[in-house]
Amino acid sequence: MTRRPLLLGTLVAGLALTATATAVPAASAKPAPAPGPRPSTSLSLRVYTERVAAIGTVGGVQVRGDGYGSAVVPVPGHKDQVYGLTDRGPNVDGPDDSKIEPSPGFVPSIGKFTLKKDGSARLVKRIELRAKDGTPYNGQVNTQAGTGETITDLDGKVLPASPYGYDSEGLVALKDGTFWVSDEYGPFITHFSRKGRAIERLSPFDGSLPRELALRTPNRGMEGLTITPDGKTLVGIMQSALTQADAGKPKSVAVTRIVTVDLRTKVSREYAYVLDNPKALGTAVSEIAALSATRFVVDERDGEFGPGAVKKLYEVDLSGATDVGPGTTAGPYSATTGVSLGGLSLESVAGTGDSASATSALTTAGVTPVSKKLYLDLGALTNAAAPGGTFFDHDKIEGVAVLDGGRRIIVSNDSDFGIGDSAGDAAPFGLVAKTRPDGSVDDGQFLVIDRH
């Protein structure tokens, strides 16, 4: 696919852009005043589309194989290769708040991709996630971490909870070839060998992760994972607020938690991350990527398509933030609900208002959240590349990798394997394809942004 230069005069997080996009007509726009003192920067954009064989035609719809966008990280030592991560596998909503998994035999996997000059991302290796004894993981609810969900196949057969259930979401690739993967069910963080076999697991159920993380909202667990550049500390982030009895609806609560784990001592800490008005915007966190030992990029997004959708990257700094984990001095700590601030949970204090009111309430209660500033308005950037929302137009921007001190950013999307819903009120169910506003079926892509 031919790439043509696209000259843009838009501002994204204060950066004047000159972009090179994939097969996008030339366009121009007048620059807006820069909100900060950052110098003008030229950015080049390239999109690589996953080329993976389909899983098959199920329920009358093709279930695509290009679902490796839950996380993306570079392959150590290879500029033109990335690892992508699937989640628990193809699934759609069913009746009565159930979930339907049309491919129950799916094994959550890491995919190794080569980014080709023709704009394709070629899958060169698939690493299935397995238990220590080699038993494949699956997408069923984990027996240790119930979600309250009922999961069935297309015929309505209930898929029982499994000790091998894993909803993989965050990925770290180490130089020794092994991986750390976080999930939404536990939430767990598991160390895997280069062949995908579990080596060890961190869990809130044995205290190797803060126990209050077990209050994660179903399907809103540890969505993002990274490692500090020195390789010493894992850093994860919860997608949304914990479910606390004294707090509002978790998806509306304006605070979530960043969790750090020292890999030598296994000491964990937690920090309050204030979301940007999730009640009004429907936003949550999908990824975290390390810039330094204390500075990180966080992906905050809604779940919508189109030019009006919210897809923003924020730079956060843990320096000066209050530890609200097991070692906190901000208030009494309970292994059940976490820190208590005047008798209230962190989530109750933050409330369901906007970010300013949440920050004020937390600060008054003695908790300093992580500092936060806009790093890149990804939605504005992709819309500027093709006004109308046709360039890298995806609802679920879930993977972000930041390389070379921010000079390169790689972004991935969760395509949901090309399926968006179920068809029928009773079994046997059919499937409905997941489509973009232009009618095309959503696919998995990697967006590479280079800053010059």
Image: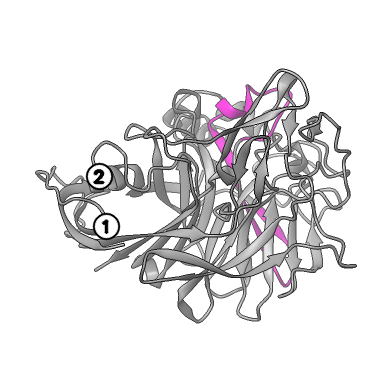
Residue 251 percent coordinates (x, y): 59, 28
Could you say which quadrant of the image residue 90 lies in? top right
Secondary element under disc 1, as helix, strand or loop, is strand
Comparing 31 with 384, the one in front is 384
- Tell me if label 1 and label 2 are in contact, CB under 8 Å: yes
> Is residue 350 visible in the rendered structure shown here?
yes
Residue 26: say if magenta: no
| CA–CA distance in space, label 1 to label 2 | 9 Å
Residue type at tag 2:
Ala
- Colour scheme of the rendered structure: one colour
> Is residue 329 visible in the rendered structure shown here?
no
| Residue 386 badge | 2
Comparing 34 with 368, the one in front is 34
Left/right placement of residue 452 relative to residue 421 reads: left
Left/right placement of residue 175 relative to residue 374 reads: right
Write the start and end of the magenta stretch as one range.
Answer: 241-269
Seen in the picture, residue 221 relative to 293 is either above or below; the reply is: above
| Residue 21 badge | 1
Residue 201 percent coordinates (x, y): 80, 61
Instruction: Report the residue that reaches farthest toward the left.
Output: 30
Residue 77 percent coordinates (x, y): 50, 82
Quadrant, the N terminus = bottom left
| Residue 47 badge | none
Could you say which quadrant of the image residue 280 lies in? top left
